[in-house]
Amino acid sequence: MEFQRSESSSPSSSMPTPNTDPKKGPSDPMHSWWESVSKARSRIQALVAILPSSSTSTSESLSSLADSDRPALSLLASPDAYAAVSASLSGSHSDPLCHWLYDTFLSSDPHLRLVVLSFVPLLTGLYLSRIHSSDPPSLAGFEALLLALYAAETKSRNGKPLIVTIPDLSQPSIYHTPLRKPQSPSPSPSPSVGLISPPLEPQLGVKSTKRPSIVGVALHSFFSQISHMPSWSKLHFCQFAAAWAGPLCPCLHHFDRHTLPLCHHPLVTADSQRIPLPWEILQPSLRILGHCLLGPLNSQDVKDAAAFAVRCFYSRANHDLVPQAILATRSLIQLDVTTRHASKPIPTSNSNASTPTKLKKPEILLVSK
């Protein structure tokens, strides 16, 4: 299912108009900058127009984003905008926010696309939780967005798979010299290649058999730009991931000598809904959690939420007997335990470390003749 693109509202008449020089044309950097700013301001105004008018302060906060020099990035970094969309997103075909996200993603501005990608955790989390309920509602709006993300990724890959080159550990690296040089040069072995994702096939709808692949591609799109994503978006994904794993189990802390702080969030409860987690969804989810867990610039809240979600996935993998998931989650947990142990402060003596100690003068013994 696909939305019909709606024309965005025109910028305010109070905004200055750029100098249109026919000799420069669209290749002028100033013209390109103004076109990007105008498009972002138009999208912000369109968002304010469709949000519920329950909070005047929120509307004023979002409207002020259009006055910045980089309105798209200001929108991306706005927790008020994320909270306002999150509170009103339903996922139905008539949901105006789904239409807004769809039209915004189809724009050519890369910063506006980042704004849409920041809602992928919310989009996939709500979609997977609701589509597997006993009485699933109409989620055509979510599915249109997922198909748009899938189509964009299919076009960018150009029929090629995603692979990773695995180095051969039996061969010396370029950073050291082997102790014994071989007598005769041996042919260099071909590097091992691991498959991350097979080539994508175009999809016109979200069928049940293709749903894991389509959702996994959306998660991969989020991961590919995760360094630009705000912390609340990462935190939201970790909370959803922990809820996807299902009911809590004592084997969560199998590798921990201490108990991690649990994520006290409505999504993480003892009766969480257990949804199917095929490898197409689990693999990009673990890559996202790996970044949230080990990224040096992430906040401690994000790291703690990711640590808890990884342990939930480990528990789920143990119960489902999935070797790939057990190995991946176990490695992430061990890295997390090692990192937390290394970051602990070294215990000092009882003396005040802030007080400088005076050098003791050497004793002089007087010996009588």
Image (cartoon, rainbow, N blue to C red):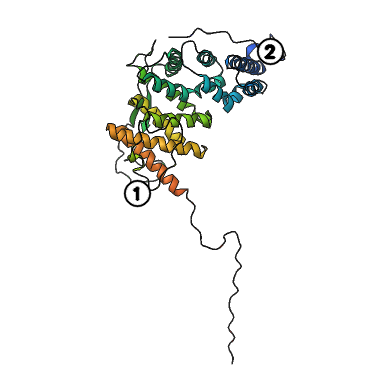
Residue 13 picture quarter: top right
Callout 1 secondary element: loop
- Nearest to the observer: residue 313 or residue 261: 261
Sequence-first tag of 1 and 2: 2
How much space separates mark 1 and mark 2, taking CA atoms?
Answer: 72 Å
Q: Whole-percent x and y of residue 286?
A: 39, 32
Can residue 3 be seen in this snapshot? yes
Report which residue position mark 1 lands on: 179
Quadrant of the rendering where the C terminus is positioned: bottom right
Callout 2 secondary element: loop
The three-letter code of the residue at mark 1 reads Leu
Q: Whole-percent x and y of residue 250?
A: 33, 40
- Nearest to the observer: residue 50 or residue 108: 50
Q: Is residue 49 left or right of residue 209?
A: right
Report which residue position mark 2 lands on: 12
Q: Whole-percent x and y of residue 269?
A: 40, 32
Q: Whole-percent x and y of residue 127?
A: 42, 20
Relative to 33, is 313 above or below? below
Residue 139 picture quarter: top left
- Nearest to the observer: residue 75 or residue 163: 75
The three-letter code of the residue at mark 2 reads Ser
Relative to 96, is 242 above or below? below
- Give the number of marks: 2
* Residue 136 numbered mark, or none: none
Q: Is residue 273 left or right of residue 115?
A: left
- Nearest to the observer: residue 57 or residue 235: 57
Q: Identify the residue shown where x is 42% and y is 35%.
A: 290
Q: Is residue 93 left or right of residue 213?
A: right
Can residue 188 be seen in this snapshot? no
Q: Identify the residue shown where x is 39% and y is 11%.
A: 205
